[in-house]
Image (spheres, helix red, strand yellow):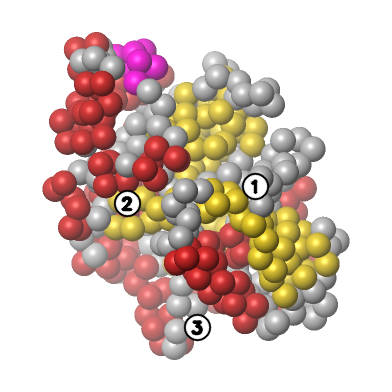
């Protein structure tokens, strides 16, 4: 009954998630050859679609005299020039397919670079996000209809209780607010997870490990969990160990970005498996810091296609074979979203992603790079590097975001805005888009 209601709820939103989930799950037993052939067909069809439907790619191909006949297989992918965030900002309208223009769904991302970007998707993309998650959850024995808890930052978390309960009931997801994550909140989370018999937790690594640490410290036990999935920020080994100890279940590290969903996910052997039916991942040329940038192609978003997009992360592909049973290619992620926890004098703690997501909204494309830095317990710098799209409206939007942050943390700190020509990276050449010097 529960599964029926959840599937029906998604259908009412125009998303046939269960049908797609069944199709995706059937591929789990494919051989390496079957995956390679399938991805090659998807790639060729996607390139043809981009050339015929997307003004930006048609102009790009024509400008370098690149013909569709020149792209015979995925081995020819490097003939296509790389798409950067700056090119996306300058050509947003030209990257949107005309047929989808009126029904496009707006999204925002900062990726790992701290550089905000607005892009657009569709219901097709939304359907693949959900069904793709279901496929990952199923790898540890989860079945549609079983409860999922999402420790996440989300909008309208202060809405009336009955609305929250109704949404949770029909989505099969218990929403736990990562922006309010302290000891009294952890107690409520624990009781909610027990009461609803949650089988899967999806979380930010920092929030999940803090919750796990609280459980360990307070001798809280919950044995019903099948798996914990961490995403959106780097999952450190000590965080993974804390979560495994608290919940006595496997912990999976998911990797993706808004522009290209479900890029990879670790297995129980801790190997990072790519999703060849969702995206293509390539290695770029090493940069001056000896980092190898990743170039990704989303095979899902037909509203605003990202073909050979450099998303700001770095890593490498490997020919190693995994013994977990999956035959999908493997990768190693070197640099993704780095995170900290911000602590204030009242004892409250907030994950760094709370601050970052204040600039995920529309109106920040004039920001080339940003960084929140908590230098003192009652003070935060917001460092901004402008680009040529910066306007007075951008400045006003930044001030509104700063005010929102100060109100949310009950004025426990002052946020000070400073404009800079550049922002220094860490000693390892990694960019923290939010960092705290208060330990």
* Residue count near mark 1 (Cα–Cα under 10 Å), binned few <14, some 14–19, many ≥20: few
State how far apart marks 1 and 2 are (Cα).
Answer: 29 Å
Residue 260 percent across, percent down from the top left: 41, 41
> Which SS class for mark 3?
loop
Pointers 3 and 1 in contact (CB under 8 A)?
no
Cα distance in 3D space between marks 3 and 1: 38 Å
For image coordinates 50% across by 70% down, the residue present is 396
Along the line of sight, the residue nearer the viewer: 175 or 356? 356
What is the span of residues highlighted in magenta in the rendered image? Answer: 73-80
Q: Are marks 1 and 2 in contact (CB under 8 Å)?
A: no
Residue visible at 39% across and 45% down?
A: 89
* Residue contact at pointers 2 and 3, CB within 8 angstroms: no
What residue would you read off at disc 1?
A: 421
Q: Which residue is mark 2?
A: 120
In this view of the protein, can residue 4 be seen by the observer? no
How many dots with numbers? Answer: 3
Q: Is residue 135 magenta?
A: no
Q: Is residue 345 above or below residue 428?
A: below
Q: Where is residue 252 drawn, in percent x and y?
A: 58, 45
Residue drawn where x is 59% and y is 77% of the image: 403
User: Which is the main secondary structure of the residues drawn in magenta?
Assistant: helix
Left or right of 132, for residue 407: right
Specify which label sits upstream in the sequence, 3 or 1.
3
Residue 75 x %, y %: 36, 13
Q: Nearer the viewer, mark 1 or mark 2?
A: 1
Residue 158 image label: 3
Q: Nearer the viewer, residue 128 or 51?
A: 51
Q: Is residue 209 above or below residue 115?
A: below
In which quadrant of the rendered view does residue 236 lie?
A: top right
Residue that extends furthest to the right in the rendered view of this protein? 439
């Amino acid at each position: 009954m529960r599964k029926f209601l959840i599937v029906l709820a998604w259908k009412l939103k125009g998303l046939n998630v269960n049908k797609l989930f069944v199709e995706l799950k059937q591929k789990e037993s494919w051989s390496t050859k079957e995956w390679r052939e399938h991805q090659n067909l998807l790639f060729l069809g996607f390139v043809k679609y981009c050339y015929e439907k997307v003004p930006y790619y048609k102009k790009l191909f024509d400008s370098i005299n690149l013909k569709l006949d020149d792209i015979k297989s995925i081995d020819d992918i490097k003939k296509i020039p790389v798409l950067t965030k700056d090119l996306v900002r300058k050509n947003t309208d030209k990257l949107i397919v005309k047929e989808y223009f009126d029904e496009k769904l707006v999204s925002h991302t900062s990726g790992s670079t701290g550089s905000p970007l607005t892009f657009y998707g569709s219901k097709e993309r939304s359907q693949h996000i959900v069904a793709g998650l279901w496929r990952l959850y199923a790898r540890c024995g989860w079945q549609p209809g079983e409860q999922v808890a999402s420790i996440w930052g989300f909008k309208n978390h202060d809405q009336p209780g009955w609305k929250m309960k109704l949404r949770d009931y029909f989505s099969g997801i218990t929403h736990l607010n990562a922006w309010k994550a302290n000891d009294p909140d952890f107690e409520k989370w624990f009781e909610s997870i027990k009461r609803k018999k949650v089988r899967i937790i999806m979380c930010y690594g920092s929030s999940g490990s803090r919750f796990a640490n609280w459980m360990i410290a307070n001798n809280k036990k919950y044995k019903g969990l099948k798996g914990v999935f961490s995403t959106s920020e780097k999952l450190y080994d000590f965080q993974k160990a804390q979560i495994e100890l608290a919940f006595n279940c496997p912990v999976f590290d998911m990797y993706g970005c808004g522009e290209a969903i479900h890029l990879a996910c670790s297995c129980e052997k801790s190997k990072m498996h790519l999703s060849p039916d969702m995206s293509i991942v390539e290695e770029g040329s090493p940069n001056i810091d000896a980092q190898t940038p990743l170039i990704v192609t989303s095979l899902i978003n037909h509203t605003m296609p990202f073909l050979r997009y450099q998303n700001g992360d770095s890593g490498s592909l490997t020919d190693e074979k995994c013994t977990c049973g999956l035959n999908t290619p493997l990768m190693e992620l070197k640099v993704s979203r780095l995170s900290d926890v911000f602590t204030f004098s009242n004892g409250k703690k907030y994950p760094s992603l709370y601050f970052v997501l204040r600039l995920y909204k529309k109106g920040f494309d004039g920001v080339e790079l940003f960084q929140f830095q908590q230098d003192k317990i009652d003070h935060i710098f917001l460092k901004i590097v402008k680009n040529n799209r910066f306007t007075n409206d951008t400045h006003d939007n930044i001030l509104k975001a700063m005010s929102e942050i100060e109100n949310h943390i009950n004025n426990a700190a002052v946020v000070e805005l400073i404009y800079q020509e550049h922002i220094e990276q860490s000693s390892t050449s990694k960019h923290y888009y939010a960092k705290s010097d208060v330990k």
